Amino acid sequence: MLGKDRELLENILGGVIVEYVQKGEMIVEYVEKGGMIVEYVEKGGMIVEYVEKGGVIVEYVEKGGMIVEYVEKGGMIVEYVEKGGMIVEYVEKGGMIVEYVEKGEMIVEYVEKGEMIVEYVEKGGVIVEYVEKGGVIVEYVEKGGVIVEYVEKGEMIVEYDEKGGVIVEYVEKGEMIVEYDEKGGVIVKYDEKGEMIVEYVEKGGIFVEYVEKGGMIVEYVEKGGMIVEYVEKGGMIVEYVEK
């Protein structure tokens, strides 16, 4: 460790050999710990500790009562802090500080966007994004180039998907997926019956059902406990009632 032009001061403190070496205008302190040589340097009023681990130089600094660990990875400085028994990793990406936390077997990535904390988790090879909105956790997943939004409502998971500039809402009811869409200011609900797609439109507080039959659109409305069927024939609306 000693060069010919280095100034050496050796002290024995509590059975530990402490070695002081002058580097430029700084005095560097070397201490042997557990078979490793630890280097101490004063930076900006702080004592920085350097340790070599697996060929990498690790830097330790005390911040706010916590020990922060700095390691260079791929040209970036990675910061490690212990929080609640977990090791949190901080990396700067595109001017933002990204926080990585290991949860179970997953690595969770946190990024601050505006005033929100965004959480990223890999699930089944897909990156899932979580954001808290209005006290609700919203989940975003990319599917086929489209960002799909999932929100828990009551005991159901609601899926929002943009189709042709319109936000479509999907809700699982029983074994069926019900699709909701806003058209012209009204809510349209789609349901699959057999091989047909049934379209429901809210009118006056009730849902009107539309089904394509033989190239025609048939409208079903419940009136007085009965199902009324409306079909356009020759420019006229014909009403059928099942009795």
Image (cartoon, rainbow, N blue to C red):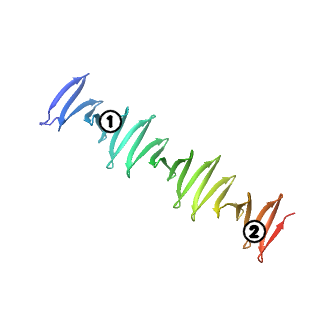
In the picture provided, is 171 more to the left or to the right than 230?
left
Report which residue position mark 2 lands on.
Answer: 218
Closest to the observer: 134 or 17? 134
Q: Position of residue 206 (x, y in %)?
A: 74, 58
Image quadrant where one finds the N terminus:
top left
Image quadrant where one finds the C terminus:
bottom right
Report which residue position mark 1 lands on.
Answer: 61
Dot 1 falls on a residue whose secondary structure is strand
Q: Residue at x 23, y 32 (%)?
A: 30
The answer to whether residue 236 is above or below residue 13 is below
In the picture provided, is 50 more to the left or to the right than 97?
left
Q: Which mark is residue 25?
A: none
Q: Compare marks 2 and 1 and give the one earlier in the sequence.
A: 1
Closest to the observer: 154 or 100? 154
Callout 1: few (<14), some (14-19), or many (20+) C-alpha neighbours within 10 Å?
Answer: some
The residue type indicated by label 2 comes to Val
Q: Residue at x 55, y 49 (%)?
A: 138
Dot 2 falls on a residue whose secondary structure is strand
Closest to the observer: 134 or 90? 134
Instruction: Kindly give the residue lying farthest to the right in the view shown.
Output: 243
Callout 2: few (<14), some (14-19), or many (20+) C-alpha neighbours within 10 Å?
Answer: some
Instruction: Kindly give the residue lying farthest to the top in the view shown.
Output: 14
The residue type indicated by label 1 comes to Val
Q: Position of residue 160 (x, y in %)?
A: 59, 56
Q: CA distance from mark 2 to mark 1?
A: 73 Å
Q: Position of residue 88 (x, y in %)?
A: 42, 40
Q: Quadrant of residue 135?
A: top right
Q: Position of residue 96 (x, y in %)?
A: 40, 49
